[in-house]
Image (cartoon, grey):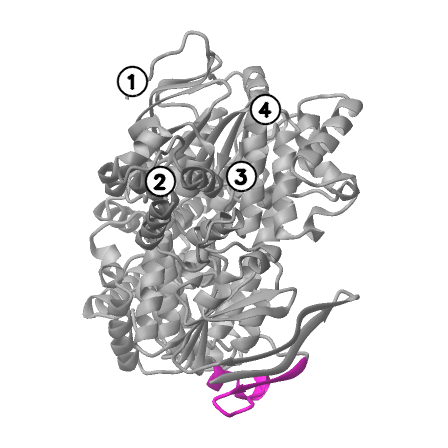
Amino acid sequence: MIELKNVSFSYYLPEKVDVIKNINLIVNKGEFLVIIGRNGSGKSTLGRLISFILEPTEGEIIIDDKKPKIDIDYIDIRKKIGMVFQNPDNQIVSQIVEEDIAFGLENLNYSEEEIENKIDEVINEVNLAEYRKFPPNFLSGGQRQKLAIAGILVMEPQYLVLDEPTSLLDPKGRKDVIELIKRLNKEGITIILITHRMEEAVLGDRVLVLNEGEIFLEGKPEEVFKEVEKIRSVGLSPPVFTYLSYLIKKENINIDIKLWKLEEIKKEILQLKLKI
Amino acid sequence: MIGKDSLVIGQYFPGNGLLYSLDPRNKILSFLFLMIIIFFYKSLFSFIPIFLLVLSFIIISKIPIKSILKGLKPILILLIITLFFHFFFTPGETIFKIFFLKLTKEGLNKGIFIGSRLIILIMISSLLTFTTSPLELTKGLEFLSLPLEKLKFPSTEIIMMITIALRFIPVLVEEADRIIVAQVSRGASFDEGNLIKRAKSLIPILVPLFVSSFRRAEELAIAMEVRCFQPGKKRTYMKRLTWKKIDTIFIIFIIIFGSLFLFVK
Amino acid sequence: MEIRRNQERNIAVEVKDLKYTYSKGLPYEKEALVSVNLLVFEGEAIGVLGHTGSGKSTLIQHLNGILMPDSGEVKIFGEKINNDKKFLKNLRKIVGIVFQFPEDELFAETVYEDVSFGPKNLGLTKEEIDERVLTSLIEVGLNESYLTRSPFSLSGGEKRRVAIASILSMRPKILVLDEPTSGLDPLGREEILKLIKRLKNDKKVTIILVSHSMEDVLSLVDRVYILNKGKVVFGGDTVSIFKDKDSIEKFDLSIPEIFMLGEELKKEGFNIEEPFRDVEIAKKEIIRNLK
């Protein structure tokens, strides 16, 4: 479990800019937590605080009952929590796929044999086995992002923070990466996904809506997305059918506002017609 | 524009043959040896066997002669200037006179000697870069420089820098291309006006390139830290280079061949 | 894929049998465009759908003379694109391109300087430039106070808008946009889409939207082409293309769910006059049927 207690983060421009304001948050082991927010809401910074890339200016972060200090326990933290960023090109270091995956293990002084074994495991997990000896620029965007994820997976993290990992990908690439993330969560890795795509947000066990550095809404996707007006007030918009149901309700038609799926809302609308 | 059809760094030509299968460390050491030893040659005639050796390597590696000549182009000016100075400014027996310039027999000999050496040096280094990919070269240098670590030479960091630079050159070229295309689409041109104007016209290219490079560098540094990279700390390497018997044979052959002609007058 | 040439409407862009290969003659040569044919009438909005690798960027760069065809031709308002310097300068007045992540092009010390870069290159007077700069800033939803600010101090969304303004200030008759909503959050995306709609409807700009976002394309354009591996594999008006589920799925694209809802309701007897191109239209049609 990762716990954030009264965590704040500011920097000085020289004027003080408060990016994260007094956040209290618990990330449960094994859960799929989604953090959404408009550009500038602080979600990236929150991600970096959770993954210990940044240290809070106030408050404390507790991982699995320990209060690590960035400079002393850095390697231990890094082995526990991995982080994947938006642009796969800025995470890939090497000119050959398998060598890039090996990078983290080389840094941790694993033996050549151990490295080979771990690469074997991970490269199949991310479906890149046939590209093992290729240079990364032969891969599509989605595949490169999977390569970046592989480079973290190989260090066997228990928690994985992903900061808008599909933002720069085309639809196919997005699908591949999201499938991988879902699979990893099923295998027990705690996922913290930062995104502004609503179709990804609904995949979480819990959704956190961030606005101006504070937690604006929190709860299960069904609970959070029902609050259509609140969500729109902070620069986001709920999934399309939820928004549709809200617009219909505003016209005084009695329809529930919830996370409708296509078939469900179609049946509901047909039912409403019959009642007239 | 420039990007897609652009630079092949080091002009590496993938291929087969003896020179392609040698360990890059071997190639670096052997060719370096050759380049140094020919500086000790005293006679023009010593160059002939070396020239023939290098030429035969080029032929068996199937490197197009056109590319070798292309590689000589940059130093053509240097070659001409060198020859000129040696031909006309070496004291001795005048063979030919034009205006106040005297071509001497000694100058002719010296010029040809030094010119030939220069050409052979270029041919050897081209041979190295044509048959060894940038990646292999870096790996070769990496392993060769490991002993230097003991002398507190920061070779891991330097090698890391070179590896990353190589990895990002195509990315930066593509990015520069993107930016040029965008600015040209806004009506920018880079070949109008005087020198100052032309320099200023590069600002819309350079500023965005710098900005994005800094951002990229920062993101990459964080990504590397997240994967536990610690400059200066010992790390293992995925073994990629294998020194084979043919490598030992090759390097011994080069050493003997090169040394043979030291003593020719 | 025959499109009837409407005699009353001007043809803004005509691409005939366009072929282009990168790195010609080298071992890694790549045929980016195999044979592209398309037609854009003045004042309409068309979409070019395609994945990365379909040849989208190559096609875009042929529309304002950055690249010249290996064979085939590109005509803008009836004139064939050629290499003549003067012609190209004029061409870039007419065809404006907003590339993906246009904020990466910002370079100047002030917003004014960046937005005026285009008009300055066109050789306009200071008064004209000032007027255009202000007008385009307002068009994108910003205001005068931004003029003296540094582009690098702005937020992501503001940067994007400044970048778009810097193309709009050239007052192009044809505007090509490459993934204009890429990387934006939901409300940011909605604003850009509204802007494009305004440009089309109010300012009568011919719009070419190149994207892999089906939602953007559906909500904005009248006709759609699908680009796949350098060829136009599908072309027709937006609604009829989306009704062809099999073809869409063959090209790894997906039909927006809101559109599918409309089609399903229609099948069940609903009186749907307008296909569900976006949520607002969907609401309107459903309410009409329920009241």
Mark 3 or mark 2: name the one nearer the start of the chain: 3
Quarter of the image where one finds residue C108: top right
Residue C54 against residue B126 in the figure, above or below? above
Q: Which residue is mark 1?
A: C2
Q: Which residue is mark 3?
A: C193
Residue A16 against residue B188 in the figure, above or below? below
Mark 4 or mark 3: name the one nearer the start of the chain: 4
- Disc ID at residue C262: 2
Q: Are marks 3 and 1 on the same chain?
A: yes
Type of amino acid at the residue the image marks with label 3:
Leu
Percent of width and height locating residue B141: 41, 66
Mark 2 or mark 1: name the one nearer the start of the chain: 1
Residue C108 in the figure: left or right of residue B261? right
How many neighbours does mark 2 have within 10 angstroms: few (below 14), some (14-19), or many (20 or more)? many
Mark 4 element type: loop
Mark 2 or mark 4: name the one nearer the start of the chain: 4
Quarter of the image where one finds residue C143: top right
Q: Chain of mark 2?
A: C
- Disc ID at residue C172: 4
What residue span does the magenta drawing correspond to?
A58-77
Mark 3 or mark 1: name the one nearer the start of the chain: 1
Percent of width and height locating residue C96: 56, 28
User: Whole-Å distance between the Cαs marked 2 and 1?
Assistant: 27 Å
User: Whole-Å distance between the Cαs marked 3 and 1?
Assistant: 29 Å
